[in-house]
Image (spheres, coloured by chain):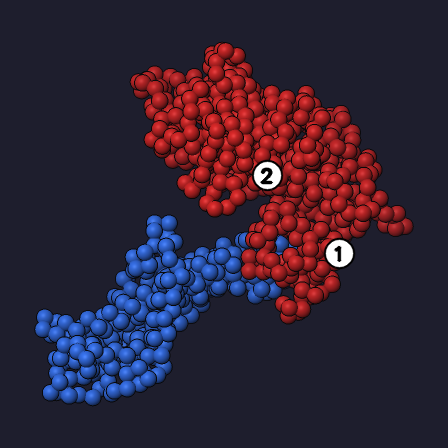
Chain colours: A red, B blue
Amino acid sequence: MSNRAAGSAPAAVSVRNLRVGFGAAEPVVRGVSFSIAPGECLAIVGESGSGKSVTARSMLGLAGANAHVSADRLELDGQSVLDLNDRAWRARRGKDVGLVLQDALVSLDPLRPIGREIADSLRLHTSLGAAARARRVLELLDAVGLPSPELQVRKLAGQLSGGERQRALIAAAIAVNPPLLIADEPTTALDVTVQAQILELLEQITNGGTAVLLISHDLAVVSRIAHRVAVMHEGRLVETGRTEQVLWSPREDPTRRMVAAIPADKPRGTRLTPTDRAGTPDRPGTSTAIPAPIPGTSSVVLEAIGLSKSFRRPDGSRQCAVDDVSFELHRGSTLGIVGESGSGKTTTARLLLALQAPEQGEVRVFGRPWSAAPEKTRRALRASIGAIYQDALGSFDPRWSVADILADALGVRHQRRALQADTRLTSLLDEVGLAASALQRRPLELSGGQRQRVGIARALAGRPDILICDEPVSSLDVSVQAQVLDLLDDVQRERGLSLVFISHDLGVIHHVSDQVAVMRAGHIVERGPASRVFAAPQHPYSAQLFAALPRLSL
Amino acid sequence: MQAELLTGADHSGRPRHPGLVDGAAGLLALFLLVAAIAPQFLAPGDPLAIHPLAAFQPPNLTHGFGTDESGRDIYTRVVHGTRYSLVIGFAATAIGLGLGVILGTLAGTLGRVVDFTVNRFLEVLFAFPGLLLALLFIVIFGPGVATATIAVGLSTAPGYARIIRAQLITVRSAAFVEAATVLGRTRWQILLRHILPNTLAPLFVLGTLGIGQAIVWAATLSYLGLGAAPPAAEWGAMLSAGRTYITSAWWMSFFPGLFIVLTAVTATVLGRSIDRRMRHL
């Protein structure tokens, strides 16, 4: 891509003591220094709110209209960009520094073909004619690995898949060979196999001599391509060093917490967060205590038999979302269902919750008909099946406070004031690690992790035997994800729950599951004990999927 | 639009001084409320008393807003006319909202056939300008305050019905409704505890905004001689009476007009202010 020589050239970006604040509030970036040489990849990792995105945006003069940016030095390609005005910044963006964002669907204009989007920076920053630009666009699309570029240039962003969009966005960002490429969570919205391909592409770009600043909350992702890692915490870089050194022997607490929070390769039962409650020590390798089977009953609590469900496409044809899916959930165990987006995981969850009826097959609960029973009969059993959703906020009535939500789930009717003192509510909150003061809050005022805790509390209110968790931690930070996973593990042990845990995240599934089902295009391609499936996948798709899983190995 | 211009909103839609504007609107609302409930408290005179000798006086110390062709005090008449305007505004909005709720709920809950029928009916209503619809109604039932009120209510109903239907459909498919099903709630419980409150709460704001519009419409009808009849102290009717003398006695039309605008703006500003507050809850 670029044939810039590494080493002798000045650093692509050099920052000393960068401070960024908004209005009168405490600065969010408080004295950050780093530099990236050509052909080097530096990753800034940190939780959301640590200031990593603001740092990246300051390199583009995009920190925000009311941001105060100050630094002892802020140089791009050897030239100071500290006090540039808007006009001067526009001349540099795209030319000296390219940007790739998390969500390519939002970053690309939905009404313009991607070819024109990519040609934009060529038009602005080069003197190429229209024909030369068109040729260069094709070269770029080819370089980022989009198959048959001639066909792709005319497509709109909405007609491409997530991975293709991300490639197109990268092509636009590197169009004029900027010495620095900033990638802000470039793979967070992508499936694991696509993520692996995008990371590979970024690695190629780095090897071509471009300096890459990678922003991510996911240590496993950065460990694959970053040469150096800088850990950001509360606006400061607490630890900077070579990737393997930072990840394998972290010296600072924030780094240690982040490394510990990665669920992949941590056996079931290992805690991902420092123990915050007495009496919950590490139980590596142990499965949950499965209650002794009641004589004369089966240990199968939930059973899917040959489930099929299809949807009508806009053109009238039918698309199979779930096809002949069968599995069993045993008492006290966790069944992990893993698959990429569109594999039918969520439809499966909806069938299990009887929110939709299967076209073929049936769901049985405690050996009794569930999907085939009328809703009236089901209602009596509904309390024993709880659900936890990805979008916890959306699953709460926006008009209700936490107290209202929990009181409703518990079937308590009270005046609002009396609810604050109700021990049933406070003990439920205590079980999910929230203080009683949360009762008066509305979910909107809570953080993502706290919302999911309320969601878990609501699911537990009916004293369920089974929990269906659909991507319960997908929208959470790694460290918050770790806390929620630990919480789910705790309540499962304490209450002897059986879990169906659905996720696209192999690392999470590996960590939580006793049994695993791998889904692809509506089918279960492989099913078995987690230890066996992960160690020796039988189906080529599972093998490919697991190979793409970012791990902390180098 | 009016409100945006007058509250000095920047293009982001946020007024620069929300407190100040809301305060002024609140004071005006208070004045209008007192004028509607106890007009003699603000203007002790008789709005219909004539003094032919004092006709066509421009605004002065005894007659702050001047007098009309029969020597009636315009200030007194404007204050006493508040009740008409507010009652018509509230009643018309209530009629419009009520009809809108009924039609919208029918369309949003009773399945495709009802939805289709109600929608086509609403589209027919939409095809007529609101004022024309109101005129049609008055032609059939004769002019007067009551008919004007109902006419204005009728012509605003289709808009409300549309909004309610859309809101119902959005709320019905919301994740929290599904979550309530998973908790084992019946359809009726879900309808009463989740769907209806979440559909109807935004209507309160919509209604406040609608009152301003209804007042303007009612005044329009009176101005056209189809609402309150002279010599009743109604703002639209007063405007109409002043029209004849507009070149010589501007105050006869100016002050009733000013109050129509102020009332409409006050209702709109308060509606927006309530809306803002509810959003930030």
| Foreground of the two, B166 or A41 | A41
- Helix or strand or loop: what does disc 2 sit on? loop
- Camera sees residue A365: no
Residue A182 in the figure: left or right of residue B143: right
Inspect the image, locate mark 2, and give the three-letter code of the amino acid beneath it: Glu
Indicate the position of residue A215 as horizontal and vertical percent values: 55, 30
Circle nearer the viewer, 1 or 2: 2
Task: Write the residue at 49% across / 37% down.
Answer: A20
- Mark 1 Cα within 10 Å, few/some/many (few <14, many 20+)? some
Quarter where residue A390 is shown: top right
- Helix or strand or loop: what does disc 1 sit on? loop
**CA distance for labels 1 and 2:** 39 Å
Task: Write the residue at 54% across / 53% down.
Answer: B173
Outermost residue, right side: A295
Protein chain holding label 1 = A
Q: Quadrant of the N terminus of chain B?
A: bottom left
Task: Write the residue at 19% across / 71% down.
Answer: B254
> Mark 1 highlights which residue?
A463
Indicate the position of residue A400 as horizontal and vertical percent values: 58, 60
| Marks 1 & 2, CB-CB < 8 Å contact | no
Residue B258 in the figure: left or right of residue A62: left
Quarter where residue A264 is shown: top right
Task: Write the residue at 30% across / 75% down.
Answer: B85
Protein chain holding label 2 = A
Mark number displayed over residue A234:
2
